[in-house]
Amino acid sequence: MPLLEAIDVHGGYGGMNILNGVDMTIEADEIGVIVGPNGAGKSTMLKAIFGLLTITGGEIRLRGEPITNLSPHKLVERGMGFVPQEKNIFPSLSVEENLEMGAFLKPATASRLKQQIYEFFPPLKEKRRQPAGELSGGQRQMVAMGRALMNEPSVLLLDEPTAGLSPRYMNEIFERVKTITEAGVGVLMVEQNAKQALRIADKGFVLAAGQNRFTDTGQALLDDPEVARSFLGG
Amino acid sequence: MNELIYFFNYVVVAGSVTGSIYAMGAIGVTLIYSILRFAHFAHADMMTLGAFLVLLLTLLFPHAGEPLGLPTAVVMLPIAMVLTSLAAVGIDRVFYQPLRNHGVKPIVLVIASLGVTLMLQGLIRLFSGTGAQSLYVDARKEIFRLEVPGVTRPIILTEPQIILFVVTIASVIALHLFLTRSRLGKAMRAMSDNPDLARASGINTRLIVTLTWVIAGSLATLAGTLLSLDVAFKPDLSFFLLLPIFAAAIVGGVGHPFGAVAGGFLVGFAETLAVFNWSVLLRPLRDSLPSWIELPNNLALVGTEYKIVVPFFILIAVLIWRPTGLFKGKVI
């Protein structure tokens, strides 16, 4: 049974449809990467899965159970983690407090998980008492991912985790995403750095105008001359 | 020396009293703003409501405080705090929450809170009458005169003033520990920082909203009651503090509880210093002054009746100098 399944999803904001039938499936040890031009509905799809906008058609399932249009709060309880692209930290809270908020529903495990996150993202340990808002972009992204991981999610949704980061940090974040998946967490992420992201992707979804254009393994998409020409800039 | 004692009694003590009251009111205003994003104009009348409930309880059980050696009103405070908190949560559920669920602009909530303020004032007046009533129903206010050796004038402190200082310090420390150490307190700061991410983290935001009203309602009860103990209960006593309390919250940096404390004391002391008669301090120098300087009897910066303008001068000055307030608050 797939971990996360989206079947023919339709939806949008205020009556305007952005998603016109998107299909996606990822397994528990897979990285799914959504790429595509601006306005293709990539981030919208992620928000639709996380219950942030109303799905008007189709279905979303988590381990076979329907979760379509459940509230974000319910989805967090069921083991879904979401890292928005922007405003993904609590700027005036310390790094440590940011992580604790991720474990709000599981306070008993907070201190054990905090240690794991510090091992996973070593730069956060020495900055743990600093307000997260004072950190650099890459470190903020680590705080944001760490906060979501504190809830021990079974599936993690990342909205452009490397936007605005230097290549060094981008590679580091991608390395971390691979490690997260090896631990049995399914990851679905939207990426602008399409080529680099598809290199680590088990599955790639190329969206355009709210529909799947190409769906294949990451490597197959990179090798497909048509995908390269139309979506990856040659 | 007499003059210094006079300064202490009329500036240090009086300023601390006003500052403590403003601080406790401003913490509530600032917390409500940071969680619910609107200026809660009914806050002063929530203070009056708290004090009114204490008055009712004191009238019902006038001797409850005797075994503890405290004024009955002080013993009734915890009960009144619970009742006022319930009322605050109830007002939120009935008036503000439906508006929030409709996604209205903050200004609509501000106007709704003006409606609540008029309603509360009317209700309280209906039952308490318009006159002043002492919260010392069946007892006398204790006044402590501390003699300073070699000086004829004593330092004067009243019992409610001492209780006020102790309660203010205790509640500020308790609030600090709650916000920085407890899971719910941190979640409250998280929600103030980024409500969407708080929800995405699984934080129960409804619970945080309820908690905010409980804290604001409890602090309002403390401030309203201790003020009424120091002077007397009047249905419009706290209402006249609304503007200085908002000035204090803004001066301190909106959304910053410790800024609210600092702002409260700044505004309180500025008011007290502005109406203080400085000529008292200059009187001992009278003989050494050149004869062409005649010391006026009253040398206050502003008359007592214009006291209310002082917070606004501070407000404007601080907003020009630091638009986000003394502590870095949210820009409104």
Image: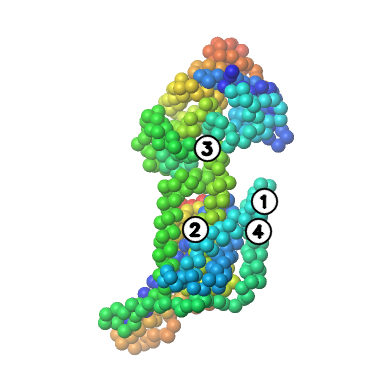
Instruction: Work out whether mark 1 precedes mark 3 in sequence or the reverse, and give the earlier one.
Output: 1
Q: Position of residue B49 (x, y in %)?
A: 58, 65
User: Which residue is found at the position 29% from the left and 82% from the top?
Assistant: B151
The residue tagged with tag 1: helix, strand or loop?
A: helix
- Name the residue nearer the viewer: B237 or B242: B237
Tag of residue B43: none
**Of the residues shown, which amino acid type is indicated by label 2?**
Ile
Q: Is residue A38 above or below residue A228?
A: below
Q: What chain does badge 1 belong to?
A: B
Residue designated by label 1? B99
Mark 3 to mark 2 CA distance (whole Å): 26 Å
User: Which residue is found at the position 61% from the left and 13% from the top?
Assistant: A226
Answer whether labels 3 and 2 touch (C-beta < 8 Å): no
Answer whether labels 2 and 1 touch (C-beta < 8 Å): no
- Name the residue nearer the viewer: B316 or B274: B274
Instruction: Work out whether mark 2 precedes mark 4 in sequence or the reverse, and give the earlier one.
Output: 2
Q: Residues within 10 Å of mark 4 (few under 14, many from 20)?
A: some
Check the picture and name the quadrant holding the C terminus of chain A: top right
**Of the residues shown, which amino acid type is indicated by label 4?**
Ile
- Name the residue nearer the viewer: B202 or A172: B202
Q: Nearer the viewer, mark 4 or mark 1?
A: 1
Residue designated by label 2? B27
Q: Is residue A83 above or below residue B314?
A: above
Q: Most extreme residue toward the right, as rendered?
A: A15
Mark 4 to mark 3 CA distance (whole Å): 32 Å
The residue tagged with tag 2: helix, strand or loop?
A: helix
Q: Residues within 10 Å of mark 2 (few under 14, many from 20)?
A: many
Q: Is residue A221 left or right of residue B163?
A: right
